[in-house]
Image (spheres, rainbow, N blue to C red):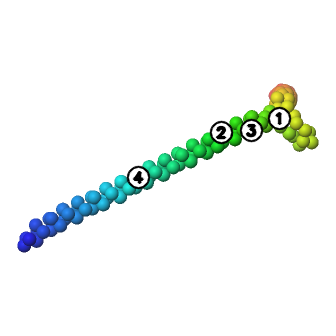
Amino acid sequence: MSNPVLHAFFLGRAFAEVLSEKVEESLTEALSELGKFDAEQRENLRQFIEEVQLRAEREAAQGNTTTTTTPADNGSSVDLQETIDDLRAEIARLKAELKNYRNTKA
């Protein structure tokens, strides 16, 4: 290769081919790692959801969700529906008082 222009052409072409191959390899490797990471995170999320569901089912089977204890009752069990009814009655009473207050202000 006595012609320096021809030599520079082939050198540039070889450089471009090698660079292209290296970029392709790096990109392929990065996408592969990203795919692995995504699959691992999905599996971790699936396991977490499964564990939460199992615990919820276990607690529901034990009957822990039907009664609750309140400090005002000194730790005795209170029916959840009774507590809800009491709260609704109190809300209704407060709404009536608020309505009376607004009527007297107007």
C-alpha gap between disc 1 and disc 4: 51 Å
Q: Which residue is mark 2?
A: 53
Three-letter residue code for mark 1: Thr
* Residue 96 picture location, percent across and down: 84, 27
Residues tagged 1 and 2 counted as in contact (Cβ below 8 A): no
x and y percentages locating residue 61 in the rendered image:
74, 34
Say what secondary structure mark 2 lies in: helix
Tell me if 17 is positioned left or right of 31 in this view: left
Q: Marks 1/2: CA distance?
A: 20 Å
Residue topped by disc 1:
67
Q: Which residue is mark 4?
A: 32
Checking the image for residue 103, the label placed there is none
Which quarter of the rendering shows the N terminus?
bottom left
Dot 1 falls on a residue whose secondary structure is strand
Q: Tag 4, which secondary structure?
A: helix
Question: N-terminal of the two: label 3 or label 2?
Answer: 2
Q: Is residue 29 above or below residue 99?
A: below
What amino acid is labelled 4 in the image? Ser
Sequence-earlier tag: 2 or 4 = 4
> Which residue is denoted by mark 3 in the rendering?
59
Q: Is residue 78 visible?
A: yes
Front position in the image: 59 or 106:
59
Quadrant (top left/top right/bottom left/bottom right) for the C terminus = top right
Query: Residue at 56% of width from left, 48% of height from top?
Result: 44
